[in-house]
Image: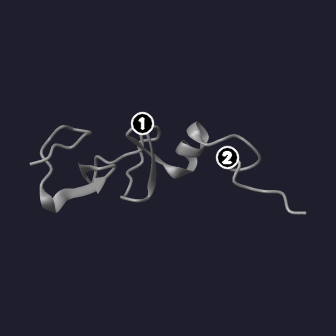
């Protein structure tokens, strides 16, 4: 039985969510910064840790620039 990387308890098939190459309890997959519960594919990863895409990951690790972490562009 795999162990949850957050709480180190066994993760049973009916309660698992797979993300970042690991099996988690649904309630244990949370943003490292704001503690928001995440779903598989709804988050970003940095150094093997999950973060919500907005606002935490963008604020901490995205390149700086105009608007939302440099993703907005000026229109001519």
Q: Residue furthest left?
A: 1
Please give the count of numbered marks on the rendered protein.
2
Image coordinates for residue 61, horizontal then vertical, percent:
57, 39
Q: Quadrant of residue 56?
A: top right
Q: Residue at x 45, y 53 (%)?
A: 43
26 vs 11, left or right, is: right
- Percent x, y for residue 51? 45, 45
Which residue lies under the disc numbered 1? 47
Q: Label 2: which residue?
A: 69
Depth check, front residue: 56 or 70:
70
Picture residue at 46% right of the left edge, 41% below the top: 34
- Picture residue at 32% right of the left edge, 48% below the top: 29
Q: How is the image coloured?
A: one colour
Q: Nearer the viewer, mark 2 or mark 1?
A: 1
Res 13 quadrant in image: bottom left
> Looking at the picture, does residue 15 appear above or below residue 65?
below
């Amino acid at each position: 039985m795999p162990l949850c990387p957050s709480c180190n308890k066994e993760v049973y098939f009916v309660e698992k969510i797979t993300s970042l190459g690991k099996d988690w309890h649904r309630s244990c997959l949370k943003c490292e910064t704001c503690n928001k519960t995440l779903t598989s594919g709804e988050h970003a990863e940095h150094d093997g840790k999950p973060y919500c895409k907005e606002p935490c990951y963008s604020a901490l690790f995205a390149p700086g620039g105009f608007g939302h972490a440099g993703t907005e562009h000026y229109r001519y």
